[in-house]
Image: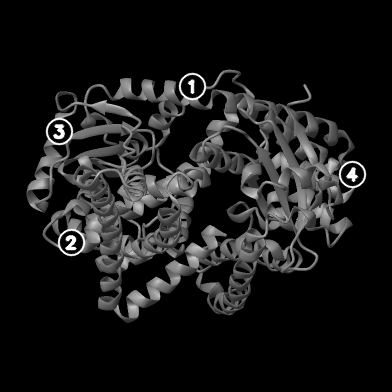
Amino acid sequence: MEHIVFVQRVDAYEQASAEQPWAFRRRILGLTLLAAAWIWGGLILGLALLAWAVLSFVSDGFQGLQIFGFFGGLALMLSVLRLTRSDWVEPDGIHVPQPECPRVYEALERIRQKNGGPRVHHLVITEDYSARIVQQVRLGGLLPERNYLLLGLPLAMAIDRPRLIAVLTQEYAHLRRNQGWLGAWVYRGRRRMQRLRDRLSDARQMTRLGWLNERFMRWYLPRWWAASFVVARHDELVADRLAARLVSKQLMGDALSEVAVRGRWLRERFWTMHWSRAHELQQAIGPFSLMAGVMNHSMDVNWVYQAWKQEYQALASYEDTAPSLRERLDALDVPPGLTPMSSSNCLAWLGKRSDRWIELLDDRWCLRFGSDWQVHRQVLQQTHARVQSLMPREPYLQADSLVELGWYMQAGAFRDDPQPFYQRALEQQADCKRAIGAFASLYIDMDPEAQLPYLAQAFEVLPAMRGQWCNLARGVLDVLEADEHYEAPIRRARREWARREELAQQLRTNLSEEVNDLGLLHQARSYAELGEPLWESELAVIQLHLAAAKRLRRAWLLVRPLQSMRGSQALLLVLDRPGVGYQEDRLWHAQLRGYLERELLVTRLMPLWLVSLEELGDKAGLVLSEIPAALFYDRTVA
């Protein structure tokens, strides 16, 4: 629900910013001043109450109201101080002093002199595919901030030195002080407020802030976060233009395009290749040594071109303030197109210890994901065994079993073509939803012209996932658009899918109420009542991941009929992890969701909702106890 409301607010603020930019900027400034007045006003009021209580006691002796004034002022001060306390955590990575990486520090100093911003004090090598600058606010801003450049080693492996400098220049532009002060301030303020927002998302933290502070922050933070998101996204475009003045428009555009294409290759090809090695290797192996060897190898020209088109046509995400690639290139006035990829990387430029950094990041990755590697190895072994058991009976299998065999041939360690199995399943059962969903999900791995009918069919028979089918269809149409032979059919197809996109948008709006009513568990049933029950192999995969989860006590697997869409269902996994912090729990949910969406075909057929037992209210445990068939995992019995 929070995400859907956030998207709606962002869309409204973007429209207001486009129609009345100055009025919108005044609103942002008003929200900023309101927060400052609330915090400093509360602190001053608390001090005033304390001073009144003490002075009154000294001059007039003890009176009953002094007790209320003293403890009221003290509670107010503590509430405000707890609200604004610093949650600064040293960036996770390898802190590199200047003597070990002098050329990077020299480049940063040259950029600083041209931009006129503050200096970067620390360089931290991270394992992320990104480069960003974070600021440590000291004593509430009374002392100068300290700036940390977080440079992802995968990014340094992907592009050459001129393009990396362009990326660093763009990031440094956010620290400017001479132009766009409001946008730059909001951009930095969002990062400062990130931990406060995360902390206040936890109901257990909200109850410690005082009733009045809680009410105000629940009203204020969602609105400020959505409005500042629009400002920060616009500030990205401004930073692009400022960086382009220093490094040239074309170089900035080339850097943005290559970073986007190699990022897609990293997500779609590299990580799949790396995790598949768990089938042969019992112990986890770090990805960065392999990444260093393959990141700059020449990629298939057709794949690179299609990947660039998909990135160029993709809409901006609501998960990050970065605008879409099309918006960024248009703002730079750079004609769309893809120049040759970098033929070298920046490891040598980073210094002589880059090999050591690769070893350290590999060790850290293995320590963090070693248990997940073992679980994935078990999943691959189970998949292999299931394929071996189905393959001898392949000529006699029913439609559902053919789809299962094709899915595991596609998603397991085999990496073989699953299309013949899906095709035979549809020949046996023309309305087999699993086969239609699997066929439509193949994306770039099949003939684009042949995939559009499957996507249209999936849009009708699997309406709960209409947004996913629209996104896939947009990518397929982008691929076909390169062929002039398809020009007229593509225009018609785009009009048809634009109409479907409107229906999908309406579905997203309707689902907001569905997510808001997750606590109504009496409307949910056991997974055994699914229209098409999960395969035993899918249930076993979920069990493997839950068994490896730390501090997970119980889990319930239910199916939730969607009220806004008759005949459609959502899969609901309720997880009981007592004593786990809100942020840790949210990160684990995201990681578990990623694994399940990669390994289960059912996530292509219906929404998967993960929720903690605590979020459903005090009566959730009692309601779940009345659905004994829903209890899917119980560690307390062992």
Of labels 4 and 2, the one closer to you: 2
Label 4 and label 2: CA atoms lie apart by 66 Å
Q: Earlier in the sequence, mark 4 or mark 1?
A: 1
Q: Secondary structure at mark 3?
A: helix
Are circles 4 and 1 on residues that touch, CB within 8 Å? no
Residue at image position (39%, 76%) is 15
Label 1 and label 2: CA atoms lie apart by 42 Å
Q: Indicate whether 457 appears above or below 423.
A: below
Q: Nearer the viewer, residue 636 or 258?
A: 636
Q: Determine which residue is flagged by label 2.
A: 181
User: Which three-letter amino acid code belongs to the residue tagged 1?
Assistant: Leu
Please say which color scheme the image uses.
Answer: one colour
Q: Secondary structure at mark 2?
A: helix
Density class for disc 4 (Cα within 10 Å; few <14, some 14-19, many ≥20) is some
Residue 522 picture quarter: bottom right
Task: From the top left corner, tell me how far across and down residue 235 is, in percent.
Answer: 27, 61
Q: Earlier in the sequence, mark 3 or mark 2?
A: 3
Are circles 4 and 3 on residues that touch, CB within 8 Å? no
Task: From the top left corner, tell me how far across and down residue 401 is, in percent.
Answer: 85, 44
Q: Determine which residue is flagged by label 4.
A: 397
Label 4 and label 3: CA atoms lie apart by 63 Å
Point out the image quarter for the C terminus.
Answer: top right
User: Which three-letter amino acid code belongs to the residue tagged 3?
Assistant: Arg
Label 3 and label 2: CA atoms lie apart by 30 Å
Label 1 and label 3: CA atoms lie apart by 31 Å
Q: Earlier in the sequence, mark 1 or mark 2?
A: 2
Point out the image quarter for the N terminus.
Answer: bottom right
User: Which three-letter amino acid code belongs to the residue tagged 4?
Assistant: Leu
Are circles 4 and 2 on residues that touch, CB within 8 Å? no
Q: Secondary structure at mark 1?
A: helix
Q: Determine which residue is flagged by label 3.
A: 103
Q: Determine which residue is flagged by label 1.
A: 367
